[in-house]
Image (cartoon, rainbow, N blue to C red):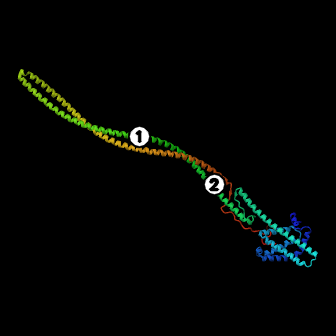
Amino acid sequence: MPKPDFQQTIAKFALDGAQTKELISAGHLVVPHLDQVLEYFYSFAKSDQEASSYFKTDGSLEHARSAQKRHWELLLNGEFSDDYFKSAKTIGRVHFRIQLPFDLYLAGYARATSYIQEMLSKQYGATYTPMARAKMLRLLGALNRAFAMDTFQVIDAYFDAQSEEQETAFRYISEGIQRMSERDLTQPIPCSQESDFPARYDPVRSSFNTLMGSMGDVIGTIQASAKNQHNTAGEISAAASDLSGRTETQAATLEETAAAVEEITASMKQSSEATTETSSLAKTAQEIAEEGMDVALNAVQKMNEISSSSEQISQIISVIDDIAFQTNLLALNAGVEAARAGEAGRGFAVVASEVRALAQRAAVSAKEIKDLINVSTDHVEDGVNLVNSAGDVLERIVGHVKRVTELSSEVAASAHEQFTGLSEINTGVSHMDSVTQQNAAMVEQTTAATVSLRQDTQVLAELVETFQVSSQDQPMAQVHQFEAQAGSDGLLTEQDTFVA
């Protein structure tokens, strides 16, 4: 008894009930001639270039012919047993496996059924009465419906096999996509030789595995890069932290240096001003010393003049001394003469005595003046010597003061240059201090950025680590062509190819 779904199909093709008896009667007429019908059919298969390509050997053709005969016998006995539906399913699956074109299958089937009708008409048509002819038409109708249902069963099995193959392929692809969505990139879709994946969808499998392998390579590279980036970010962060500390220390030191240089600059400015003032005073002292030297020279000249005058006075005193001496002699002679004169010369003796006294006093005074002049001359000579010595000293002092003035000028110029250079250094240090402060701020920002970068790389590393990638270096297995296994799930082998 056919299954309920098969029973519905039988009913749709009007092959149940009384029609079953008509099919059985038709079968009794056709089955004895099946060899003739199959001979006609396979002669067409061998003559057609496309059809003959499905028969590699005479043995495969004979095997297909035998299977087809058994199948039609199951169809025409009217029982519609499980063996028949299983046979129809096998034929449909074999047609799908070898990808037999529908036009070739339907053309061969149409030729066979037409040949059966033509054969029966020729064999029994001339002897039929009208009633017998009507019965024959009913039998031919039952045959047409039976062959049509058989065609439907084979095609339905063909599409079932196609649907199963698609479902199998989609199942593998869906499972692969599911694994990829779960970030598992380690399990490619196996080839048909390693699983039941249909070889017909091998390009899709190959593309999927290539995509998975490419993604695995990318994710693996990203993982390695993320690890390296994380390590590098850690090193940069540590270096930036150290640099930040050193920059802060450098900024503090440079700030102190800037303050010290500023103090030195101020001190150097005062020193420059003092040196300039000293140079001015030295120049003034040189001028005064030169004036003192001029005065000393004038004093020496005056001393020389006084010495000359003293010599003249000394000469005059000598004359006066001579006059006093002569006067004293004259007074003495006058006294002698007055004494000789006696009383008459007494008054003249007194005068002579007074003149003598005056001459003696004049001589004494002249002697004292001469002595004083001699002492004064000595003093003048000493003064001249001292003034000459003072002049020499003043000349040396002027030379030294001049040299001091020159050195003071050089020191002043050098101090001014030092002040200018130190001012520039102070400006540069101040600029460096400003730049260092900016660098310190930048280093702090860089440190914060590297910390953020390290956190981001950590997040990236943790994210890509969630992917499972293959650690194998060799590429994923490529697709292998489908090879049917002999006798699998009750289907015919590839030798059972083109079956009507």
Indicate which disc, 1 or 2, sits on the residue closer to the N terminus. Answer: 2
Looking at the image, residue 177 sits to the left or right of residue 37; the answer is left
Looking at the image, residue 144 sits to the left or right of residue 463; the answer is right
Cα separation between marks 1 and 2: 66 Å
Q: Secondary structure at mark 1?
A: helix
Looking at the image, residue 441 sits to the left or right of residue 3; the answer is left
Q: Secondary structure at mark 2?
A: helix
Image position, residue 369 (x, y; %) = 19, 30
Image position, residue 338 (x, y; %) = 7, 23
Q: Residues within 10 Å of mark 2 (few under 14, many from 20)?
A: many
Instruction: Identify which residue is drawn at 39% across, 39% down.
Output: 277
Relative to 134, say whether 429 is above or below. above
Q: Amino acid at mark 2?
A: Ala
Image position, residue 434 (x, y; %) = 52, 45
Q: Which residue is mark 2?
A: 226
Q: Please state, as top left, top right, bottom left or bottom right, where the N terminus lies in the image.
A: bottom right
Relative to 455, say whether 491 is above or below. below
Q: Can residue 496 be seen at all in this image of the molecule?
A: no
Q: Which mark is residue 88?
A: none
Q: Which residue is mark 1?
A: 273
Image position, residue 455 (x, y; %) = 63, 50
Q: Amino acid at mark 1?
A: Glu
Q: Please state, as top left, top right, bottom left or bottom right, where the C terminus lies in the image.
A: bottom right
Query: Mark 1 or 2, which is nearer the eye?
Result: 1
Task: Classify residue 132 by image quadrant.
Answer: bottom right
Looking at the image, residue 183 sits to the left or right of residue 43; the answer is left
